[in-house]
Image (tube, rainbow, N blue to C red):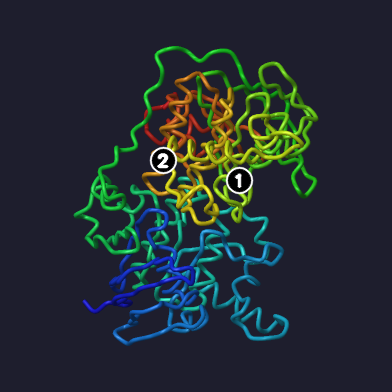
Amino acid sequence: MKPLIETRGLTKVYPDGTVALRDVSLRVHPGEVHGLLGENGAGKTTLTKILSGLLPPTSGEIRWRGEPVRFRSPREALRRGIGMVHQHFALVGPFTGLENIALGAEGGGALGPLRASTVRGRLERIMDESGLRAPLDVPVETLPVGVQQRVEILKMLYRDVELLILDEPTAVLTPQEAEELFETLRGLKAQGRTVIFITHKLKEVMEITDRITVLRGGRVVASLETREATPEKLSTLMVGREVVSEARRPRKATEPGEPVLTVRDLCVRGESGLRAVDGLSFEVRAGEVFAVAGVQGNGQTELVQALTGLRPFQGDVQVLGRSLKGLLPGEIGALGVAHIPEDRRKMGLILPFTVAENSVLGLQRFPRFRGALGRLRWRRIYGHARTLIEAFSIQAPGVRAPAAALSGGNQQKLVVGRELSKSPRLVIAAHPTRGLDVAATQYIRDLLARLRDEDVAVLLVSADLDEVFQLADRIGVMYEGRFTGIAPADALDRETVGLLMGGLPLEEALRARARARGSGEGSP
C-alpha cells in the first residue's frame, strides 16, 4: 500500500549542535492508527513538529501521497490535510466551541450571523458523521478537559485533515474519557482518516494502534505491526535494555505509623476567588502512600500549593503536630517537607541556572552552603551536585551545565534528588512522572515506593491511574474541590475510580460497578 505520508532520511540538527533526528525514515499508511513511541529526547516531538510544519528539517525529505513536500508553516501543512492536537490545547478560554473551531479558518472580520450559521451547519454534519459531539455555544473554559479535547479534534476535522497527529492525548483524561477518545479514533479510522498517536502508555498503544514505530536517540529502531508487539518488547526497544514490568509495588508487612500530615476542613480559593478546595479532610501516615486521584483542574493544584506555603488557606493543617498556618515555603521545608512540583520547568527549576545552582535551590541559606558574610560555598555546592548526579543517575554534561541542557527525565531526577537530600518526613509529589519515558517513570516510582518502606509519608497527586494503583495504599478521589471517596487501594478498581473522578459518590460508584458486573450490590 502506498504511504499517505513518508519521511526519507529526515535529520534535524539544532543551532546549538544538538542532533534531534538522525536519518529517520517513517511510513504511515492511509486509514491506520500509527503509534509513535520513544523516551524523552528520542525525537518524537521534533519529528511531529516537522510533519505539522512547525519546524523545518535540516536534511531529508517528506513525501505526501508520494509527492515531495516542504512545509514552511502549520498553515501549509493544514492545506495539505495534516493537523496536530497538542498536549496543551490551543483554545481561547472565553470563546465558545464554535468560535474556537472557526478561529483562523473564516478570514478576517467579525464572525457575523450568516457566517456563524454556515459554520454551525457544517459542524453539525461533521459531528453527525464522526459521532464526536461537543457543545458549541458555551465558553470552552467551562468545559471538562475531555470535552475541550473534542473541540480541538473537531477543529481539525473542520479543516478537513486527513492525517491527525495526537500528542499524549490521554494525559489528563479519566478512563471513561480515554475510552470515548478511542471510540472516536476507531470511527475516524472507519471514515478512512489516518492518526499518529503519541503516548508513553504501552497499554494504550497496544489497544488502539495498527502499527508502531519506536524512536531511540533520534533514530528509528523498529517499525512493526501491533499484533507482533508486546509491552515488554516495546519497553526494551524504547530503552535499549530490558525494563521490569510495572507491577503493583508490594506493601510493607508492617502497618503505617502515626499521622505525619493531618488536614481538617481545608478550604482554598483559586485564582478566580472561588473555592477550589472545599472542606477537605484527610491524613497521611508514616510509611504509607496516600494518593489523590482525579482529572486535573479539580483543586489538586491549589491543594498542593496550600500544603507547601504557596497559597493561603482556611482550616487546620499540621505536620507532626506543627501548624502550617502562615508559614512560608522555606519554613515548611524546615519541618521535614519535600515538594516535587507538578511542573518541573516552571516551578522546580530555573532553566538557565546551572545544575549546581539548581541542586541547592531552597537550600542555599543552609549553613553548609553559606559561609562568612553570606557568601556561597561553591566547592560544597559543586560537591553536593556531583553527589546527586551519582546517587540519582542523572545524565548531565557537568555540574556547570545549564539545567535546560538536561532531558525532561533528568530534570525531574534533579528536582527529586534535591528535595530528597533534605531527608524529609513527608514528600508531597505532584504528577511526579508526567511526560517521562518508561525508564525514568520506573525510576521515580521505585524511589517513592522505597521512601514509603523507609517510613516516610508520601502524598501522591496524580491523574495517572496506573501510577496511583502501582503505588497507593489509600486513594482519595477529588472532584470539584471535594473527595467523592477515600478507600484502601485494594478495595477499588480502575472503573470505580473512574466513576469517582466523574463526580459519583463512593457508595453509588460501588453499586454501579456491582450492577455492571451483574452480581448485585457489593464491593468490587
The quadrant holding residue 505 is: top right
- Secondary element type, mark 1: helix
The quadrant holding residue 471 is: top left
Q: Spatial distance from mark 2 to mark 1, Cα to Cα? A: 18 Å
Q: Position of residue 351 (x, y in %)?
A: 59, 54
- Crowd rating for badge 1 (residues with CA inside 10 Å; few <14, some 14–19, many 20+): many
Residue 56 seen:
yes
User: Could you say which disc has been placed on residue 357 in the image?
Assistant: 1
- Crowd rating for badge 2 (residues with CA inside 10 Å; few <14, some 14–19, many 20+): some
In the image, residue 163 above or below residue 437: below
Q: How many marks?
A: 2
Question: Where does the N terminus fall, quadrant-wise?
Answer: bottom left
Q: Position of residue 393 (x, y in %)?
A: 41, 40
Q: Residue at x 47, y 35 (%)?
A: 468
Q: Position of residue 118 (x, y in %)?
A: 61, 81
Q: Is residue 422 left or right of residue 175?
A: right
Residue 507 seen:
no
Q: Nearer the viewer, mark 2 or mark 1?
A: 1
Q: Residue at x 34, y 47 (%)?
A: 203
- Secondary element type, mark 2: loop
Q: Is residue 251 left or right of residue 428?
A: left
Q: Earlier in the sequence, mark 2 or mark 1?
A: 1
Type of residue at label 2?
A: Ser
Q: Residue at x 66, y 41 (%)?
A: 299
Q: Are marks 2 and 1 in contact (CB under 8 Å)?
A: no
Q: Residue at x 30, y 72 (%)?
A: 23
User: Could you say which disc has been placed on residue 266 in the image?
Assistant: none
Please tell me which residue lies in front, 288 or 180. 288
In the image, residue 14 above or below residue 498: below
The residue that mark 2 highlights is 393
Question: Where does the C terminus fall, quadrant-wise?
Answer: top left
In the image, residue 284 above or below residue 69: above
